Image (tube, helix red, strand yellow):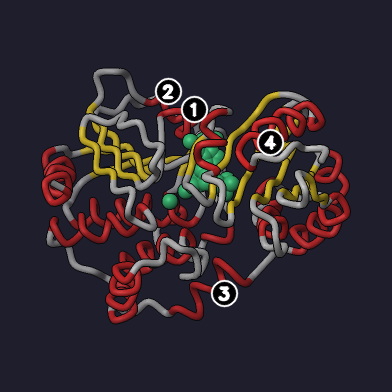
Amino acid sequence: PNRQFVREAALFMREHDRFLVLSHINPDGDATGSALGVVLMLEQLGKQYVVVNEGETPEKFAFLPRFDQLRNLRKQPLEEKFGAVIAVDCADESRMGDVRSLFDSGVRLLNIDHHPTNDGFGDVNLIRTDAAATAEILFDVAEELGVSFTEELALCIYTGLLTDTGGFRYSNTSPRVMEIAARLLSYGVKPGEVAERCLEEITFAHVKILRRALQTLELSHQNLIASITVSVDDFLETQAEREDAGGLVNYCRNIEGVEVGVSFVESEPGVVKVSMRARDRVDVSLVAKQMGGGGHAKAAGCTIRGSLSEVKQKVSLVLEEAVGVKSDE
Ligand code: 5GP
Ligand code: MN
Ligand code: MN
């Protein structure tokens, strides 16, 4: 059955001429690598495209081919309405943000994704929840299309695989991931350089945010939950951007004995981005879903309106049920 959806996706790319290519808000390495991977495939097919994101793509991905083609819709609005859309790494339409304004309900939409919480919002849905990354699925699409695995295309796909598996460390690192990664290396990808860009290099602003955030780290629910908090003031005082606050949640989850790590990042007054990472016992995608978000069993998130203390209280109660321990015990 999977093969059939891969064929349908390939057909979709062949039968239209001009595409809107998009990924999710606050794009990560899989979203960006997958969107640019699709773009490179469309170029090989002789198609036209516009590739957009609601906001800015982190500068750390500037090493990817066609990075300069990525349009930030907030800074460069678009008038055009599109007939064919390819969405990658988006679990549902809300993940697209304002990019949704670029098409109407009559649009033809191809949805390529790997999130278990994907609601199948496309006309063609290529969803494989066993895939470690959307980029892993794109590898199959590229083979089906018969496009050539240039070093650039290989780099885009590799970047998605590397980042969504946390550097080939998370439990989604399957034999197939390693096989595909090996193929991509044989097409010229330089693993040390990609890892340096995506995983090792950090901004000084990140370190400054981290320094403050670690002061807030607290354990609760009989030490099963660890959380970290970043306020709007922290951003102002360190002159950090939102993307500089990435990865903080791992310091919580990695603490021995902790089952769920949580970060509360107040991106603007009254808006809190919640990130959750689980060890074994809790499926955080279900927790996130209860609060209007989604994700994977071991990595999920949501955005909640309210003050930091209101949001922390709300999440604490939902987690209380998930770990089976009261927050104040
Ligand atoms: P992060 O915590 O790194 O932002 O996201 C972790 C995972 O949860 C990613 O797979 C991401 O796609 C998903 N995720 C994060 N926030 C949301 C959200 O608001 N809605 C949905 N559906 N998924 C989210
Ligand atoms: Mn993603
Ligand atoms: Mn992904």
Query: Left of 101 or right of it: where is 255?
Result: right
Q: Secondary structure at mark 4?
A: helix
Q: Which residue is mark 1?
A: 98
Q: Secondary structure at mark 1?
A: helix
Give amino acid for label 1: Asp
Decide which of 102, 133 is in the foreground and name it. 133
* Gap between marks 1 and 3 measured at Cα: 32 Å
Q: Quadrant of the C terminus?
A: top right
Mark 4 or mark 3, which is nearer the start of the sequence?
Answer: 3
Instruction: Kindly indicate the quadrant of the structure image that contains residue 109.
Output: top left
Query: Left of 172 or right of it: where is 279?
Result: right
* Gap between marks 2 and 3 measured at Cα: 36 Å
Q: Residue at x 88, y 54 (%)?
A: 215
Q: Secondary structure at mark 2?
A: helix
Q: Which residue is mark 4?
A: 320
Location of residue 121 with respect to 297 vertically, above or below: above
Give amino acid for label 3: Glu
Q: Which residue is mark 3?
A: 196
